[in-house]
């Protein structure tokens, strides 16, 4: 079972962004109920950088969602003042998840993790931006975990996010997998997560689920603990819940080098086969990869 963090309550969303800015509770509460009904374990409340009155916005979103569900929440903002404001009013089931903790804001963010008994998602984002390869991710992870431990946070409360990039940046995708294969040995006890939909950012809408599903099945080979996902994708939720074991094992066999005869595969298996080969960097990505 992969722990699912629902992504859709997001300031970037065409429908919910305006609702957040104008403090209209209805659409946000409907989405929260839909995410819980779709089996989300956490609801991500992403208010972005929230430079202007971020503290008031985060408190409003937390309280608005709390009126319809007591599901655990993931507070997602790069504004530490807004983060703390949300933690202050946090109630409900389970511990809060502090999302998008970054090496560049650790001094402000780490003390809050203990103070509010939260879990933390640590982004492997370097002081000069995106890490270039798996080793840079490793160095960032070691440094982040060391500083978190120093602040009294045990590995079990740290969820490492290697940062997924769009499939068009295939070298980054490969290094994300390589890093995930090392994480268990590097940081025993640490958990992991990934913003799954990042992989299909910029791809045509009707093709995004194929990429997201294959990416999740591949990450499961490295025992990914959780993922930030669109829970409206029921096939994706099934994969996460272990309800499509034959598909997941096919994906893992392909990753191990097995190349089944495509004519023996069902239509669905063939779709995964093609997509996994794109994500392994064996087939060049194009918006028509499934038709090849
Ligand atoms: N890691 C961590 N947190 C994260 C991310 C990550 N939080 C934000 C983001 N990345 C994950 N959340 C989303 C939310 C929405 C989408 C992608 C990632 C998305 N939305 C559609 C779009 O933009 O086309 C639909 C938007 C709409 O409703 O209008 O793709 O990597 N730790």
Image: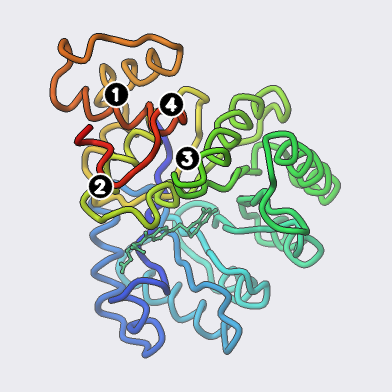
Q: Earlier in the sequence, mark 4 or mark 1?
A: 1
* SS at badge 1: helix
* Residue 289 versus residue 233 in the image, above or below: above
Q: Earlier in the sequence, mark 3 or mark 4?
A: 3
Q: Nearer the viewer, mark 3 or mark 4?
A: 4
The chosen color scheme is rainbow
Mark 2 residue crowding within 10 angstroms, few (<14) / some (14–19) / many (20+): some
Q: Nearer the viewer, mark 2 or mark 4?
A: 4
Q: Nearer the viewer, residue 58 or 289?
A: 289
**Snapshot quadrant of residue 62:** bottom left
Mark 3 residue crowding within 10 angstroms, few (<14) / some (14–19) / many (20+): many
Q: CA distance from mark 2 to mark 3?
A: 23 Å
Q: Nearer the viewer, residue 218 or 38?
A: 218
Residue 285 percent location from the top left of the image? 38, 40
Residue receiving disc 4:
282
Q: Nearer the viewer, mark 4 or mark 1?
A: 4
Residue receiving disc 2:
207
* Residue 135 versus residue 150 in the image, above or below: above
**Snapshot quadrant of residue 238:** top left
Residue 88 percent location from the top left of the image? 60, 72
Residue receiving disc 1:
273
Residue receiving disc 3:
226
* SS at badge 2: helix
Q: Earlier in the sequence, mark 1 or mark 3?
A: 3
Residue 22 percent location from the top left of the image? 37, 90
Q: CA distance from mark 1 to mark 3?
A: 23 Å
* Residues at circles 2 and 3 in contact by the CB criterion of under 8 Å: no
Q: CA distance from mark 1 to mark 2?
A: 15 Å
Q: Earlier in the sequence, mark 1 or mark 2?
A: 2
Residue 245 falls left or right of residue 148: left
Residue 254 falls left or right of residue 135: left
Q: CA distance from mark 3 to mark 4?
A: 26 Å
């Amino acid at each position: 079972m992969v722990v699912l963090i629902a992504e859709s309550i997001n300031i970037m969303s065409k429908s919910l962004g305006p609702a957040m800015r104008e403090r209209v509770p209805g659409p946000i509460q409907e989405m929260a109920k839909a995410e819980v009904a779709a089996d989300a374990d956490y609801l991500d409340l992403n208010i972005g950088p929230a430079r202007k009155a971020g503290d008031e916005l985060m408190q409003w979103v937390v309280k608005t969602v709390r009126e319809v569900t007591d599901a655990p929440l993931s507070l997602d903002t790069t504004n530490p003042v807004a983060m703390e404001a949300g933690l202050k009013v946090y109630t409900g089931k389970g511990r809060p998840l502090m999302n998008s903790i970054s090496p560049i804001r650790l001094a402000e963010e780490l003390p809050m993790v203990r103070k509010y008994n939260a879990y933390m998602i640590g982004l492997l984002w370097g002081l000069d931006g995106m890490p270039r390869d798996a080793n840079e991710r490793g160095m960032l992870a070691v440094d982040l975990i060391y500083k978190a431990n120093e602040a009294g946070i045990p590995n079990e409360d740290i969820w490492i996010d290697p940062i997924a990039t769009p499939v068009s940046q295939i070298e980054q995708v490969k290094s994300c997998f390589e890093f995930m294969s090392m994480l268990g040995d590097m940081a025993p006890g640490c958990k992991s997560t990934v913003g799954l939909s990042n992989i299909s950012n910029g791809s045509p809408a009707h093709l995004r689920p194929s990429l997201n599903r294959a990416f999740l099945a591949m990450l499961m080979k490295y025992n990914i603990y959780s993922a930030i996902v669109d829970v409206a994708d029921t096939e994706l939720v099934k994969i996460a819940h272990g309800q499509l074991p034959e598909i997941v094992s096919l994906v893992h066999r392909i990753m191990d080098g097995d190349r089944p005869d495509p004519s023996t595969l069902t239509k669905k298996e063939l779709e995964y086969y093609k997509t996994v080969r794109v994500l392994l960097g064996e087939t060049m990505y194009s918006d028509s990869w499934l038709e090849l």
